[in-house]
Structures are given as structure tokens and as C-alpha cells.
Amino acid sequence: MKYLLFIPLIIMLATAQLTTSCENHKAFMGDEISSCEKCHTDYALLQKVFSPDTEPPASGCGGDAPYYEPYDRVYMGGEGFEDYRKSGHYEIGCAGCHFGNDKSDDKNTAHSGDFVSHPSGEADKTCGICHEDITAKFASSIHNGMGQMRKVAIRSGYNGYEDFSKLPAHQIEGYSKNCATCHGTCGNCHVVRPKIGGGGLANGHMFNKEPDMVGVCVSCHSSRGGHAFMGVASGTVPDVHLSKAGMKCTDCHDGAELHGSGETVSQRYAYKSLPECGECHTGMANKNTYHSVHITSFDCQVCHSQNYNNCGSCHVHGAGARIPAYMDFKIAKNPIPDIKPGFRLSLVRRTLAAPDNWKEYGVPQYSNFSALPTFNYATPHNILRWTDRTKTDGSCSKNCHIRNDAGVLKNKNLYLFEENLNSWELTATKGITVDGTLPASWFTTK
């Protein structure tokens, strides 16, 4: 009987332990944190004890990252620090996430043992204690590089994302040093700048629930997303969603999408939580003649996108891209009809893939390069109501359809043909070119 009396108590203790796991993560505020805070809010001291960089700044599609001195990257006393001191994350204490020794003001001692400079790189041990649901799903998030790793693995002869770890260690090292400058961790969006944004604390160590659009989103999504949306790209103007409605990235792309849903999908367009134009723009099918005729033929961007940036071949630690990035507009056969079954044609964007992407990391050639096209399904974020294609005189043929004008094929430049491909792209990509699929009448002199 006496043992039965302990059962309710055990249940109560177990329940309390589960419901207070996050609270237990918080440290007792007192002298324990003073040494960390004392150093990291003393700018002059940080200038004396900092460790110089051993690697050059990150670089990527948008160019070289802005440079911040090592002591600037770890200085907490700037703007945002007082907000951080009032936050729940501050109550956790420095060692609650960074581990190490928070009772010493000696740099080497404080940063000894199990010290971690970027805790979200080990999110299951840090962020996951309070945000378990998010961190568990983030492992397969596109922001964690799942889609990019999948393609590298497939072109290397493996099945997909789940096999990325089977790649040669040196190739994975190359991915981490180059591709992962954007694809990163929780902290890259919510605490520090992404590597390609210069790295370091962005707002006095304040945890920002909604990432700064320019400082975070556009830092990574520069050449193919942010610059298009903001009208920075050559010959373009800002997306109408920005210029007319003042919208920002998170107005369409919410946390459920950005953090991941926990599902490991074949590629990013397969996510169920992606935003769709029709969620806001209802009744479009019968809005006008052009919509009613083409609504099931191709996606909205085919008519409403401006020219957009295309990659050349990736310069993974090499001497530069084989094909410099360039502005273009190409319509091809839908490369992902299984995922986007409603469209026969779509916009496509040349990717950074080349057979010898990893030659600087011990892989002279991809073993299965042609497994994927070198042009991807594209949804440029540079939408306008009136574009070169929607400004018609009542006939699509003038601005969209190919037409033979005294032997000159007008508008042919809008479409992807085999002749637009490099020799090393043919096998991989000819399946989505429009050769032989467009109406024969388009090529006949009228």
C-alpha cells in the first residue's frame, strides 16, 4: 500500500519535468553571467583580445560579403542589447546555449571545454530544448539546404538528400565552405547575420522573431530573389507587391514554410505550405480573355514577370563562373509536371550546375551530371501587372507567340531551344526544350 502512495507523486513529478523543460533551461541570473556580459559589452577589451580571421570573408551569387571586424561581430553592447536584456532568452544565461565556463573573465578559460560559438549549429541541444517542434522539422527544411544537397547527391550518383552524407568528405567540406554561406541555422535568421551578410551579431544579441527583410532575407536571396523584388536587377523595377502594397517576404512566406513541415520532399516546390497567387488573387480564370485561354497552359509569371537573373556555372572555390550571370527570360516545357501538373509551359532559370563543379575538392566530374536539367522551374519575384507581354494590342502573337516576319522569327528569344544549350547541357536539358512542341503555324511566314 505504501508504494502505491508514491505513484501519484511520480506522475506529478514526471509531468512537471515535461512541462518545465524550457524553464529548467533558464539559468539563475547572478554572477554567473557577469563575466560573459562584462567582456562582450566592453568594446575596448574586445579590440585587445580578439582573434584575427583565418579565412577570407564569404562570397556567393550576390558578390563578396560586407566585412565586419571580429570584435564588431561579437560586441553585444550596441543597439538592441537593452531589448535583449528584457527578453526570455536573456534569462537562459550565456552558458545555457554557449556552454563553456561562464564564471571566468579569461577568454581562453571562458571559451574552453564544451564551448560552442554558434549554438544553433547544434540546435537539438540548444534551440530544441524550448523549440523542439521547430528544430525537429527544420532538419528537412529548404532553408537547411535540403534541396541543394539533394541535387548535389543525385548528380554524384546517389538517390537524394538522404544520401548527401555518403559523399566524399572533401566534397562535403566544399559544400560547407561555399553553399552553406546561405543555407545555415536558426541563428542565421534570428540572432546573427548570415555569413554572406557579413556574419556576427545583428542586433545586440536580440532574438528577432521576424528576420529583417534586407539584412537577412535579401542577403541570401540577393541575385535571384531580393534584387528582383526590390528592382535592383539591371533593367527592372520593383515588384508590384512591394511598390504598390509595401509587402515584405514574410507576408507570403510564413514560419510554417520557412521552418519546414517535417516532410522530406523531392524539392522545394513540392512543399504543401507554399503560397499560391490564387490565395489573394481570386477569380482570375475568367478575369479576361487572356486568362481564360491560358490559365491552364502556364503559370502567372510567364506573362507577369520581368527579365530575371540566371546563373552561369558555379564557381566552387575556383576561378569564377564559366558563364557569367545574366538577365534573361525563357519559357520551356514544365520541368516538374508531377509537382506542378497544371502547367504545360513555365518559366525556367539556368542553374549553377556544371559537370566539374567540385574539381577543386577532389571530384573532377559529376558521375551522373545529366540526371537533372540545368534549367529549373522558376517563379521570379519581380511581378508587374503590365509587362512586355501583357502590353498587347489585342493579340498575343505580337509579344508572346513566335511569328515569322519575312523570314525573321520574332519572339523566338523568349523560348528555350536546344540551340540555346551548351554541349555539356544537351543530354541533361534537351527534354524540356520547346523544339517540336510549338504550333507549326508560328514558324510560317504570314
Image (cartoon, rainbow, N blue to C red):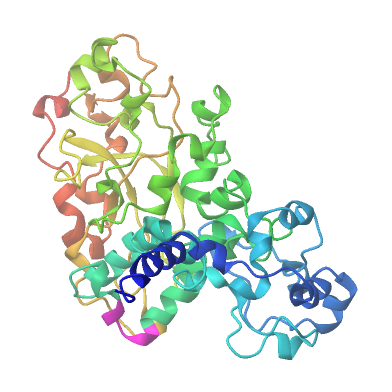
Residue 95 located within the stretch drawn in magenta: no
Left or right of residue 6: residue 346? left
Q: Which residue sits at x=62%, y=59%?
A: 191
Location of residue 293 with respect to 23 vertically, above or below: above
Residue 318 appears in view = no
Q: Which residue sits at x=26%, y=75%?
A: 366
- What x and y, as percent, mark residue 241? 50, 27
Magenta part of the chain? 165-170
Left or right of residue 94: residue 37? right
Q: How many marks?
A: 0
Location of residue 7 with respect to 397 vertically, above or below: below
Left or right of residue 346: residue 17? right
Q: Quadrant of residue 378?
A: top left
Q: Quadrant of the N terminus?
A: bottom left
* Most foreground residue, 244 or 146: 146
Q: Which residue sits at x=18%, y=26%?
A: 296
| Prevalent SS, magenta region | helix
Q: Quadrant of residue 338?
A: top left
Q: Which residue sits at x=77%, y=71%?
A: 30
- What x and y, as percent, mark residue 407? 22, 29
In this view, which residue lies farthest toward the right? 44
- What x and y, as percent, mark residue 432? 17, 47
- What x and y, as percent, mark residue 286? 24, 11
